[in-house]
Image: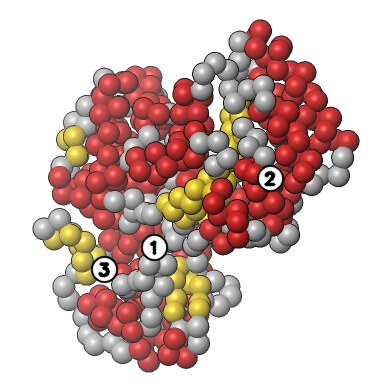
Amino acid sequence: MATPGDPVLAVKLAALKKIFRPASPIDDRELFRGRTRELVKVIGAVQELGQHAVVYGERGIGKTSLAYMARDSFRQTSMGPSLAVRIPCSADDDFASVWRKLPPRLVSELDLLEPSYAEELSSTVDRSKSVIDANEITPDVIARALHLISSRVPLLIVLDEFDRIGDLGSPTLFADLIKTLSDDLIPCTLVIVGVADDVDGLISGHRSVERALRQIAMPRMSPGELREIIVGGFAALHERAGVKITLAPQAESTIVQLAQGFPNYAHLLAGSVGEIALVQGLENAGTDVLALALKHALEEAQQSIRTSYTEAVSSARTDAQFSTTLLACAMAKVDELGFFAPADVRDPLTEIVGKPRETQHFLHHLKKFSDEPSWILEVRGEGRKTRYRFRNPLMRPFVYMKGLKDGYLTVETGSIRPKSK
């Protein structure tokens, strides 16, 4: 076992944390795993004049990492110099404020080019900034500014976290801009990235804008893609730091199941296993190491997730059993949008507690979860048509992890299931 303060251990841990990164997107092509189809679609949109892309899906499934890979591919495939800018959006933004962020980010990109290219393009960037600064910011003005730049150099702009824009009128203005860029064949590509169930949740306005938008839905990762993250990550650790760690097949399968299709949980759990293995000097990590890693991962999960969970299951009554009901919600069968009916909770809850449970036994729990201060579940419909889903989809794998740690779940023949009562 390594001793605290060991400089060799510190180097190995630093290498591990650069590979398994649950809290930040992947911007290293060698570490990017899965998402081949989605990346091909984005690159296809970037390479086709008049075509733009909108990437949408649940929170935490790797949309921003995909955007970084699209930006990297754009730079590599461009003939000569190019400019690829990522603009993060926020709740305080509107159409105008988003585009005011463009000039300084273009200047930052110029700094990465050869000095001769940067000097040649700096005057063009200055002219585009003058257009933005001197006029009311409308779709036509932004199209003009983008045309100035893209007529000189290939230009890609990624609008990330687009769903966070607070101004309700902005999506229509962005739709107008996309239509103008497409109709006028302006050689600039926009990639819009955000949380939504469908494209209408991000972009509204011209129906005709659909022909200019390549719609790319980001589903949850497949088990194979999650395994790529785990196995490929430890292979990269061996290659980059000379550290070999092999996961037992059951430990690997358990991580895949716990991640529930979310890459950041695969990074979190695999990274926690790797950290414990490094500290203990282990080359092989089995389920015993995973059990320790699970506790560490729960502590390292997003603060907002941990807080919401605690608020949801807390009660003055010791027999309230909110935690088991929430676990049953996580195990319930869902539709394509992640919604489940109260009846879908009945069977998993019966398995968890070891005795029959009907809807009337837990319906008040669902109401608590979907009301303040919890707000952990989102509700649609009324009466018999009432459906629920986790407001933050990242809560569901967290609840699974908590259920396994607390002994409500067990791993049998490579599958996670309720522990027999």
Instruction: Name the secondary structure under disc 3.
Output: loop
Residue picked out by circle 1 = 396
Return the mark for residue 119.
none
Instruction: Name the secondary structure under disc 1.
Output: helix
Return the mark for residue 180.
2
Q: How crowded is mark 1: few (under 14 residues within 10 Å), some or many (20 or more)?
A: many
Tally of numbered tags: 3
At horizontal 38% and vertical 76% (from top left) the residue drawn is 340
Residue picked out by circle 3 = 408
Q: In this view, does 136 lie above or below 362?
A: above
At horizontal 71% and vertical 61% (from top left) the residue drawn is 168
The single residue placed furthest to the right in the displayed view is: 134
User: Viewer-nearest of labels 3 and 1?
Assistant: 1
User: Foreground: 129 or 414?
Assistant: 129
Please state the horizontal and vertical placement of residue 365, each as a whole percent of the image: 44, 82
User: Foreground: 298 or 72?
Assistant: 72
Q: Is residue 69 left or right of residue 270?
A: right
Kindly report the distance in space between the C-alpha atoms of the residues bearing marks 3 and 2: 56 Å
